[in-house]
Amino acid sequence: MIELKTILLVEDNPQDVELTIEALSEYNLANNVISVSDGVKAMEYLRCEGEFKGRTTGNSAVILLDIKMPRMDGIEVLEQIRKDEKLKHIPVVMLTSSREDPDLKKCYSLGANAYVVKPVDFGEFMEAVKHVGVFWAVLNEQPPKQ
Amino acid sequence: MYKSINSNILHLIDFKKVDSLLEGFNKTTGFVTAILDLEGNVLSKSGWRSICTDFHRINPQTSKNCKISDTILANKMGEGEKYHFYKCLNGLIDVAVPIIINDEHVANLFSGQFFFEKPDSEFFKEQGKINGFNEIKYYDALQRVPIVSEKNVRIAMDFLLNMTQLISDLAFQKVEQKELIEKVGESEKSYKMLFESNPHPMWVYDLETLKFLEVNESAIKKYGYSKEEFLQLTLKDIRPSEDAQKLIENVRQVSDVLSFSGEWKHKNKAGEIFVVEIISHSINYKNREARLVVANDITDRRIAEEKIREKDIQFQKLSANVPDLLYQFTRRPDGTYIVPVASQGIKNIFGCSPEDVLEDFNPIAKVIHPDDAMRVIKDIEYSAEHLSYFTCEFRVNIPGKDTQWILSRSNPERLPDGSITWYGFNVNITEHKLVEEKLIESETRYRNIIETSPVGIFILQNDKVVFINPGGEKIFGAQTPEQLIGKQIRDFMHPDNVEKSTIRIQRLLNGETGIYPVENRYIKLDGEIIEVEVMATLLSYKHEPAIQVIFIDITERKRLREELEKLNGELELKVEQRTAHLEEANRELESFSYSVSHDLRSPLRHINGYVDLLYAKYKDKFDGKALHYLETISSASKQMGTLIDDLLQYSRTGRVEFTAIELDLNVLLIEVMKEIEPVLRGRKINWDIQELPKILGDYTLLKQVWINLLDNAVKYTRNQQLAKISVGYNINDKYFVFFVRDNGVGFDMNYVHKLFGVFQRLHSPNEFEGTGIGLANVQRIIHKHSGKVWAESEPGIGASFYFSLPIMRKGIK
C-alpha cells in the first residue's frame, strides 16, 4: 500500500482552491490536500506554528505554491523553505497564471522543482494538476529520513 | 671769263702808246681827246683847252658843272648810239663814243672843248664875271677854242675809235694767248702731278717691247729701283719668273682701251713678293703704242680681308655655343627688315637659320605671337625714329614647341644709306617669365587671401602695428587701417594679458616654437572686450624682421561653446530622465502584461472550470438548449484565453532581447513539426521540404515564425482532398528568401496589405479560427532580423508566404 502524504496547496483564490481540489479528487487525492490562503499561513503550517501548532500530520509530499498572494508571496515562501534545513527537500511546484510571469526564472534559481501554468481550459488544468499531484505525492520517493 | 679779261684789258693796254698817238693826233688835227673808264677815271688825254684846264675845271662852281656834264654824257653811252654830242653846262660842246671790246663796253672815248658855231661872247663875259675869272685871260682862252663842223668831228672820232679798237683787240688777243698758255701749262703740270705724286705706283710701258717708258715716284719707292734702273727694265722683271708666260698671254689679250687685269704677284728689287691689282689704259706715248698702268698694292687689303674673315669665323665659333641669339638687325630705307648677321642661336630663338633671314624677315615675323607682333614693330620703329635703345619682350611660337618668351635688346645706329641697324642679342626668358608669372600669381593669391580673409592679420614691427588687413580692421571695429597702424600691444590688449603676451613674443623671437595658438583678449576701438584665438609667426616685412599675428574673434564661439556645454549637460540629464521614464514604462508594461495574464486569465479559468464542473457533474439535469449554452460559454472563454495568450506573445516579441546564434533550419524545422503535431492529426498532407541553409538568428523567435507559417498552411488547406505544402528558399543578392507554399484557399490580393496587421483577418472565425495576431508577429520577428516578409495568393489556388533573412557571413560561428 502506497503511503499517501499530504499535498500542501498555497493559494489565496478560493475558486482556484476549489477547482484544484476538484481536479485532485479525480485521483482520490483530495483528502490529502491541506489548503492555506497565503505564505504566512503556509510557513506556520510547515513549521507547526500558530493555528497548526501540534498538528499530527507529517510533512507534505509536495507543495503547490501560487506566486501571487497577499502578505507573503510564493517566491518568499520558496526562499524560506529552501533555507530551512527541515523543509528544503520538499518538492515545490509553482502554480502560475501565465508563462509571462517574470518571477518564473527566479523560482527556478531558488530551487523550484516544476511549474504549472494554470490553463483556461479546465480539462487541461485537471490534467496538469493530476499529473503533478500523482507524481509528487505518490510516485516520488522521499529523501531518506534521518 | 671775259669779265676777268676785260677788267684786265685796260691794264694790258699800253696807255703811253695811246697817249702819244692821241698827242700826235692833237697836234695834226687840233682835236683834244681823253679815254675815261666807266667810273670816270681819266685813262689818257691830250691837248686839253686852257679854258677847261685853267678856268672851268679849277673854279669850284664851274668845276661842279664839268662833273655834272661828264656824268650826263657818260650816262648817254648805254643808249646804243655811237656818237653822243652834248653842250656842257659851261657852254662848250663835248662828244663821247663808247669803246666796245668783245661786245663789252669797257671805256669811253671823249673829245670836245670846241664849238660848232661862233660862241656867245656875252654868256662867257657874264660867266667870267660871276666866277671871278681874269677877263682878258679868260677871253684869250675862249678865243683859242676852235669852231669845227660836225662832219669833221665824226671822221676824227671814227679814226680814233678804230685805232683804239685795234689797240684793244691786240691787247685782248695778248690776254687770250697768255691765258691759254697758262692753262696748258697748268693742265700739263696737273697731269704730271697726278702721275708723279700718285700714291699708287704707275708706269707706262711699251706694248711691243714691254719696256718701261715712264714710272712715278710711288713705283720707284715701292719696287726699290731708281728711275734710271726702272727704264732699263721690262714688265717681266717685276714678276716672279713662274708668272712670265701668263703675263705675255695677258698682254696679248689686252685689247680694250681700259682694262682691269685683276690681281697679280709682283716682285720688288729685294725679291719680296706682294699682290697688286692692275688697271691699265692704252695710250700713245711719244709716238709709241703703250699702256699706262696703275698698280694698287692690295696686300694690306688682303690682310684686312683675311682678318675680317677670321673675325667672322671667330664670331661664328664664339657664338656657336651661345644658345641665345646675337644679331645685327637692319631696317632698310624702304622700311623692310633684314638680319645681316645672326648667330646659330637663332635656331633656338626663332626656329630658322642665319641664312634664312639674310634678306628676309618673314621667317621671324611669322613665329612672333600674333598678339605681340604689333607691339614689337612699334618698338622697333620707335627705336629707329629716336635712335633709342631697343628693349622688348615678346612671345614666339615655333611649330612643335611650347610658346617661349624672348627678350631682345640692341643699340641702333644710322648708316650712310639711311638704313638703321641694331647690334644686340635675344635671350630666351621663358623660365624667368614662368617663375615671374607664378610669383605674381602666388603673390596675388596670398594678397587676396589676406585682403578678403575674415580672419584678422596684423604685422608687428618694433612693437608697433605696421600692417593690418580689412578682416582685422573689422574685428577691431575700425573704419581705416590708420586707426590701428602705429598702435602698440598694450593699446589694444586687455591689461591682464599684456605681460604674458610680451613674454610669449619674446620667446617667439628667441626661436621657440609650439607656443601658439593661444587664447587672448583684445579691446575693440569702442572699448568692447573680445575673446580671440591668436597665432603668431616670424616673418620678414619690408626686409626687416617682424611678427605676423593672425587672430580670430572667438567671442561668439566661446559663448556658443559654453551654451552648448550647458545644453549638453541638460540633454544628458533629460536623456537620463527619459531613460528612467522609459525603463519605468517598460516595467509598468511588463507588470501590466503580467497583470493581464494573471488577472484576466484567472476569472476566465474559473468560468471555464465551473462550466466544465457543471457539465461533468450535472449534465443529466440539463436539456439540450442548456447544454448548448454551456458549450458556448466554454468555447468563448477558451477563445478569449487564446487571444490573451497570443497578444501577450506578440507584445513579448517586441520587448524580448534579440540573441542571434547560428541556427540550422533543418533541425529547427523538425522541432517545429513536433510542436504543430496536434493540428496534423487526422490530416493527409503532401510535404515537400527542401534542404535549408544555416542562418544567424534568435532561436525562439524564428521557431515562432515557422510555427505560425506552417500552422497557417495546414489550417487553410484542410478543405483540400490532398493538401500540398512546400518549404524552400532562393538566394537573392545578400538574402535568403524562404517560402511556405500551400494549395489552400488563398486570399484576395486586394487585401494583402492587411495581412500582416494585428487583429486583421481575411477569413471569418466560422471558416477558419484565429486571432489575427500570428502574421503580425511573424512580420515583427522578421523585421527584427533585418528581413522582409510578403505574400502572394490566388483565391482557391493557394498562397505563398515569403520572408528574407541576411545570408550569414562566413567565419561567424
Image (cartoon, coloured by chain):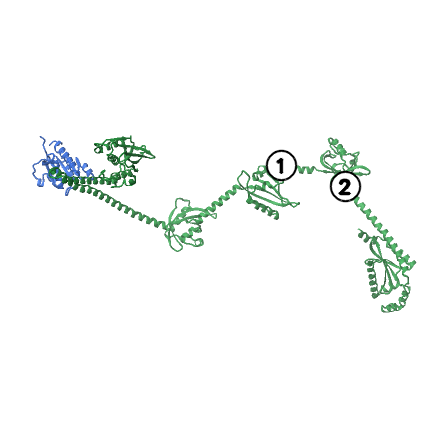
Chain colours: A blue, B green
Taking depth in this image into account, of B236 and B155 the one nearest to the observer is B155
Residue B439 lies, in percent from the top left, at: 49, 44
Looking at the figure, which quarter contains the C terminus of chain B?
Answer: top left
Chain ID for label 2?
B
The CA distance from mark 1 to mark 2 is 40 Å
Residue B355 position, x and y percent, is 61, 38
Q: Which residue is tagged 2?
A: B195
Q: Is residue B745 left or right of residue B47?
A: left
Q: Is residue B189 visible?
A: yes
Camera-nearest residue between B544 and A112: A112
Asked if residue B73 lies left or right of residue B29, the reply is left
Residue B508 in the image, given as x and y percentages of width and height? 41, 46
Callout 2 crowding tier (Cα within 10 Å): few <14, some 14–19, many ≥20: many
**Taking B412 as reference, is B472 left or right?**
left
Q: Secondary structure at mark 1?
A: helix
* Chain at numbered mark 1: B
Q: Nearer the viewer, residue B112 or A107?
A: A107
Locate residue B687: give its quadrant: top left
The amino acid marked with disc number 1 is Ile
* Image mark for residue A86: none
Residue type, label 2: Phe
Q: A82 or B10: nearer the eye?
A: A82
Q: Residue furthest front?
A: B624
Instruction: Specify few, some or many for label 1: CA neighbours under 10 Å numbering under 14, 14-19, or 20 or more.
Output: few
Mark 1 or mark 2: whose residue is earlier in sequence: 2
Which of the two discs, 1 and 2, sits closer to the camera?
A: 1
Q: Residue at x 45, y 54 (%)?
A: B482
Secondary structure beneath dot 2 equals: helix
Q: What residue would you read off at disc 1?
A: B313
Q: Quadrant of residue B74?
A: bottom right
